[in-house]
Amino acid sequence: MRTVCLTWAKLAFPIAGKVSINGDMLIIWLQLAFCASVIAIAGSRLSFYGDVIADKTGLSGNWIGMILLASVTSLPELITGISASALANAPNIAAGNVLGSCLVNLAMLVVIDFLHNRESFYRRASRNHILSAGFGVLLVSFIGISILFGSMTAELAIGHVGIQSFIIVMLYAFAIRTVLVHEREQRKDFSEAVADRYPHLTLSGALIGYSLAASVVVAAGIWLPFVGTRLAEVMGWNGSFVGALLIAGATTLPELAVTISSIRIGALDMAIANLLGSNLFNTTILAVDDLFYLNGPIYSNVSPAHAFSALSAAAMTGLAVIGLASPPAKRLMRSMGWVSIGMLSIYILNAYVLFYHAQ
């Protein structure tokens, strides 16, 4: 019986090489499961305390999701990108992590739509998300163009940092300011007294709880990419695919946990703002990676396949804008709208291109 089990395991994991099926590989999978479990539990508390902070301060769920939650849940991507650029000299991992994380975040909108089985979640979402999504299209498109023409613009670098990185940071700052000013004006036009939904909690207690949950999410999120990298080495996958799908999927687990938890407590706009805000924050991570990558502008040293990922992210975000501006009235197969099906199709196509054609 033991021989049969080992034979099946070798067929199931043919590229595992010399790694013991019952030893190292099992430990790696257990570490991955442990990280995911810790992030899921801490992420649920993060969403809860974020909602409490929004209630106590009068800030909108959009603001909390876009700034507070997005900055915390994106820290694993930041640490992973710096490590890949400065220590591992792996620009493809760094670029793939950023763009892949954007794609995974957008794919989570499909998950949200699927969980809202009665009607499309776009019909309940705030139209204020259109502005942040529009800036997301602008930033990821600019990154895609920077990668395509990176070798032609290498001489425009300031030191070893590409001029594109400075433009990305300025665009991000302008986007955040514009979104927050717009929302502040919207709230002036519409305000109402809302009863305290958490009378048994204080703002200071919520801030402490939020900080503790954020610390756990960040700690587990920082460890997670290293586990994912080790697993990728065992499986023998290429750098672009690993960065854009495996590592990106690992580092976006905090976003997934926060998104699902936010939906469960009824904070839909906070969940959407977290995903779109994380994508805006992620684009600046590539600029930070460029700073730590000392072999010239990172845009001219990565695979052109990442430009396809940027194009895919822009197209998926564009579909999200359409869904927010004109919510689908009908659901196909009673599961999701045509906007979500289009986004899912683009995500699968991008995964196929990276797996079979990236280097």
Image: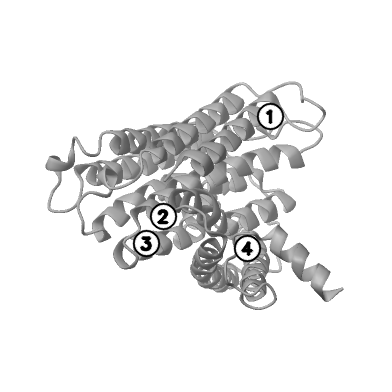
The kind of residue tagged 3 is Ala
Q: Which residue is mark 3?
A: 84
Task: First in sequence, mark 3 or 1: give its number.
Answer: 3
Pair 2/4: label in front:
2
* Residue 93, numbered label: 2
Mark 2 → mark 4, Cα distance in angstroms: 25 Å
Mark 3 → mark 1, Cα distance in angstroms: 40 Å
Q: Are marks 3 and 1 in contact (CB under 8 Å)?
A: no
Task: First in sequence, mark 2 or 3: give its number.
Answer: 3
Residue name at image x 32 percent, y 45 percent: 173
Mark 3 → mark 4, Cα distance in angstroms: 25 Å
Pair 3/1: label in front:
3
Q: Are marks 2 and 3 in contact (CB under 8 Å)?
A: yes
Task: First in sequence, mark 2 or 4: give its number.
Answer: 4
Residue name at image x 38 percent, y 51 percent: 92
Residue 244 vs residue 3, the one in the foreground: 3
Residue 44 vs residue 249, the one in the foreground: 249
Please, is residue 87 above or below residue 54 in the view?
below
Q: Which residue is mark 4?
A: 43
Q: Which residue is mark 1?
A: 123
- Residue 124: image quadrant is top right
The kind of residue tagged 2 is Ile
Return the residue found at the far bottom. Answer: 23
